[in-house]
Image (tube, helix red, strand yellow):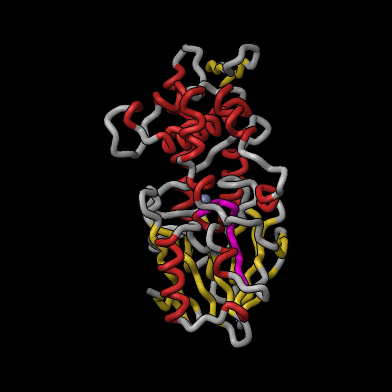
């Protein structure tokens, strides 16, 4: 069902079954000549049905419709090649577009998980249950690449692209200055905390994320429209909460280490997670994967602050509090 938010601006709620995110907000701007769809849902039938129904209600003609994908995750990009026509432009971050290169593979992530203590016999299962592996577009979309500062116009909406690396390296938010609207993708969410992960030690995702929160803090926003769940909340209050949350998570990592030498998988198992499981062993494999990635992001951040040291001398990388 499509819900009108403002004149010419609609939201379609796309269910994401079995995902802790519950659903995705796809935003649709109806312009006089062309329309714009911001984010799409997974490449799976239940999402396709919800999008098709909402777009039919709004009488959206695919030939007169363009897409903007806030970042590369499959819940945002998955359906784009099924919904777009040959006449659609698909606006997408130059940086995240690399993920769709033919020579890009999951192998470096799998190898990285293994050297961080993820059990070798569970790696294949973790990969097979990863939503990005299962629900991405079946072919590489033809992108119109965008960078920080570009403007996407649709009707009388002028959407300024704001590079906000952290949740992904190429994440882009959209700011509509006249209406003081901020399409935040997964950079800012209200009911849940955006997932921050690192799958390479070259990437300090958490430091990038915190800098990207500061970057948008003073934009002047009346309404934040996030990629998931509700949009009841104030931008600056939420940014303050998110920064506090990650500061506390980093301290929790230091507590878990408490003088011991541990690998990232063990540290993830020792952290607290907002999930309906009594023990780490009960975690669904995909959640163990995300938790390990998030632990690594916090370890890498603490390493950058000089509070944790990393020993990569053995086959499994270990950490200690400095
Ligand atoms: Zn995401």
Where residue 123 appears, as percent x and y from the top left, is: 50, 29
Which residue sits at x=51%, y=23%?
120
How many numbered callouts? 0
The quarter of the picture where residue 190 lies is bottom left
Task: Let me know if residue 256 appears in the view.
Answer: yes
Q: Is residue 318 magenta?
A: no
Q: Of residues 63 and 154, which is closer to you in this image? A: 63
Whether 118 is drawn above or below 196: the answer is above
Residue 178 percent across, percent down from the top left: 58, 76
Residue 307: x and y, percent?
57, 22
Residue at 58% x, 83% y: name it.
31
Q: Is residue 253 visible?
A: no
Q: Is residue 4 left or right of residue 36?
A: left
Q: Is residue 195 above or below residue 91?
A: above
* The image quarter in which residue 182 lies: bottom right
User: Which residue lies at the image location 53% right of the left edge and 69% below the top edge?
Assistant: 181
Please state, as top left, top right, bottom left or bottom right, where the C terminus lies in the image: top right
Q: Looking at the picture, does residue 8 appear above or below residue 26? A: below
Q: Nearer the viewer, residue 298 or 170?
A: 170
Q: Quadrant of the N terminus?
A: bottom left
Instruction: Find the residue positioned furthest to the bottom.
Output: 32
Position above or below: 313 against 86: above
Q: Residue at x 49, y 16 (%)?
A: 262
Q: Which residues are magenta?
A: 66-74
The image shows residue 293 at horizontal and vertical percentages of: 52, 34
Tell me if 228 is positioned left or right of 215 in this view.
left
In terms of image quadrants, where is residue 110?
Answer: top right
Instruction: Answer with left or right where residue 277 lies relative to residue 37.
Output: left
Residue 70 shown in magenta: yes
């Amino acid at each position: 069902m499509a819900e009108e938010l403002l004149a010419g601006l609609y939201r379609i709620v796309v269910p994401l079954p079995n995902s802790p995110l519950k659903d995705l907000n796809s935003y649709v701007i109806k312009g006089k000549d062309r329309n714009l769809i911001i984010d799409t849902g997974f490449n799976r039938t239940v999402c396709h049905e919800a999008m098709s129904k909402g777009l039919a209600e709004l009488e959206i003609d695919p030939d007169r419709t363009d897409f903007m994908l806030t970042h590369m995750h499959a819940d945002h990009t998955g359906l784009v090649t099924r919904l777009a026509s040959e006449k659609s432009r698909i606006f997408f971050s130059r940086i995240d577009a690399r993920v769709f290169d033919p020579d890009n593979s999951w192998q470096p992530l799998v190898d990285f998980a293994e050297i961080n203590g993820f059990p070798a016999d569970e790696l294949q299962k973790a990969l097979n249950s990863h939503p990005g592996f299962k629900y991405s577009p079946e072919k590489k979309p033809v992108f119109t690449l965008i960078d920080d500062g570009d403007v996407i116009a649709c009707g009388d909406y002028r959407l300024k692209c704001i590079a906000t690396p952290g949740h992904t390296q190429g994440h882009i938010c959209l700011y509509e200055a006249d209406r003081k609207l901020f399409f935040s993708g997964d950079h800012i969410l209200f009911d849940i905390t955006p997932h921050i992960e690192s799958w390479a030690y070259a990437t300090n995702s958490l430091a990038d994320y915190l800098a990207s929160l500061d970057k948008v803090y003073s934009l002047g926003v009346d309404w934040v429209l996030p990629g998931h769940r509700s949009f009841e909340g104030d931008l600056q209050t939420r940014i303050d909460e998110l920064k506090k949350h990650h500061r506390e998570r980093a301290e929790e990592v230091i507590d878990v280490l408490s003088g011991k030498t541990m690998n990232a998988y063990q540290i993830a198992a020792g952290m607290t997670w907002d999930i309906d499981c009594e023990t780490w062993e009960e975690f669904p494999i995909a959640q163990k994967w995300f938790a390990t990635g998030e632990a690594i992001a916090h370890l890498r951040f603490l390493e950058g602050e000089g509070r944790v040291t990393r020993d990569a001398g053995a086959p499994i990388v270990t950490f200690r509090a400095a």
